[in-house]
């Protein structure tokens, strides 16, 4: 068994947000969990979170774990965050939102780790009276569990590449006249190629695609919904690097008459050896 030291990392956040108008109030991070470098286990739970009549959530809980798996001789880590009964102004509601990332790093071997978002789900999502139909890409990114595999699949599989180009709005800035949406689509300014879009060995991609059609006051673009006189709802984002993955399940930018932001279920997991293998 290899005895090379491993530095674990995992974090999970249930809820966080702030209201900036018509009053100012910050929702501090709820049910936060994190691992020390030596691994272990952590969990947290919050009940009856509320911001006046703007936001409420009965239960949110998180869990992180990291340990050495003797059977596979790997360092395994997971981070999970779940909220139940999410309700934002009765406009954005969900029965259950879960974000999860798990990783497995071969102990003392110079191999790329496998990191997957399997377990990330959103159940019963409604936005502005619409039952939201989601196409999940969680299975794709769980199968493509290394950065090398993701890069290869993107280059060699034209159908997979085309689906991501459409959902991530790669090179489609002109299709979004509302510049406030550009921040959700970091590759909208980049011309599509056969190479996975990256910056400093990092890519940001959608975990879900919203299948509902647009209608008056309800605009669907990729994995974002813009509700007129309410805000922009960003559903499922995956950040991938060779040695880390992060998932944000739901983010809302509120705009008029209530301003602010709200985040539900954000997790990340990875780790690294402290020294090179012998």
Image: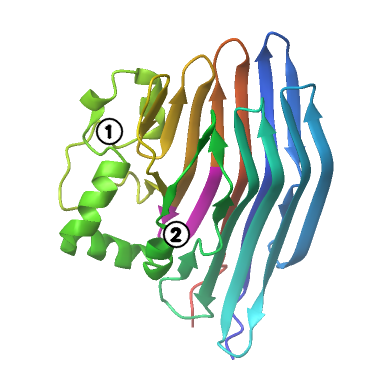
Farthest residue to the right: give it. 47
Task: Name the residue: 35% across, 46% down.
Answer: 200
Depth check, front residue: 123 or 153: 123
Image spot of residue 191 (x, y percent): 17, 37
Query: Label 2's element?
Result: helix
In this view, 105 is above or below 130: below
Instruction: First in sequence, mark 2 or 1: give its number.
Output: 2
Q: Which residues are magenta?
A: 240-249
Q: Which residue is mark 1?
A: 188
In this view, 69 is above or below 158: below
Judge the density around disc 2: few (<14), some (14-19), many (≥20) Cα neighbours within 10 Å: many
Query: Label 1's element?
Result: loop
Q: Is residue 174 left or right of residue 69?
A: left
Image spot of residue 264 (x, y percent): 63, 41
Magenta residue check for 170: no
Task: Name the residue: 82% across, 45% down.
Answer: 46
Image spot of residue 192 (x, y percent): 17, 42
Residue 70 image label: none
Task: Name the residue: 50% across, 31% down.
Answer: 233
Residue 138 image label: 2
Q: Identify the image quadrant of the N terminus.
A: bottom right
Q: Nearer the viewer, mark 2 or mark 1?
A: 2
Distance of mark 2 from mark 1, alpha carbons? 22 Å
In this view, 257 is above or below 237: above
Q: Is residue 36 visible?
A: no
């Amino acid at each position: 068994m290899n005895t090379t030291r491993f530095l674990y990392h995992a974090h999970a956040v249930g809820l966080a947000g702030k209201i900036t108008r018509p009053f100012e109030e910050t929702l501090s991070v709820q049910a936060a969990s994190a691992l020390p470098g030596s691994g272990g286990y952590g969990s947290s739970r919050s009940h009856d979170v509320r911001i006046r009549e703007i936001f409420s959530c009965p239960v949110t809980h998180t869990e992180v774990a990291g340990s050495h798996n003797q059977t596979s001789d790997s360092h395994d880590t997971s981070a999970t965050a779940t909220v139940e009964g999410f309700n934002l102004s009765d406009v954005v509601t969900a029965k259950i939102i879960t974000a999860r990332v798990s990783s497995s790093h071969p102990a003392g071997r110079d191999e790329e780790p496998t990191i997957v978002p399997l377990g990330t789900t959103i159940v019963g999502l409604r936005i502005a009276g619409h039952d939201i139909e989601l196409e999940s890409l969680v299975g794709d990114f769980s199968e493509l569990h290394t950065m090398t595999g993701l890069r290869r699949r993107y280059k060699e599989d034209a159908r997979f590449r085309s689906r991501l180009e459409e959902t991530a709005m790669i090179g489609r800035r002109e299709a979004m006249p509302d510049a406030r949406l550009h921040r959700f689509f970091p590759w909208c300014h980049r011309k599509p190629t056969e190479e996975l879009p990256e910056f400093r060995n990092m890519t940001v991609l959608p975990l879900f695609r919203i299948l509902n059609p647009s209608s008056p006051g309800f605009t669907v673009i990729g994995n974002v919904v813009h509700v007129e006189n309410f805000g922009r709802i960003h559903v499922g984002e995956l950040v991938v690097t060779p040695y880390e993955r992060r998932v944000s399940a739901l983010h809302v930018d509120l705009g008029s008459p209530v301003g602010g932001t709200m985040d539900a279920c954000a997790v990340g997991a990875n780790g690294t050896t402290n020294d090179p293998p012998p």
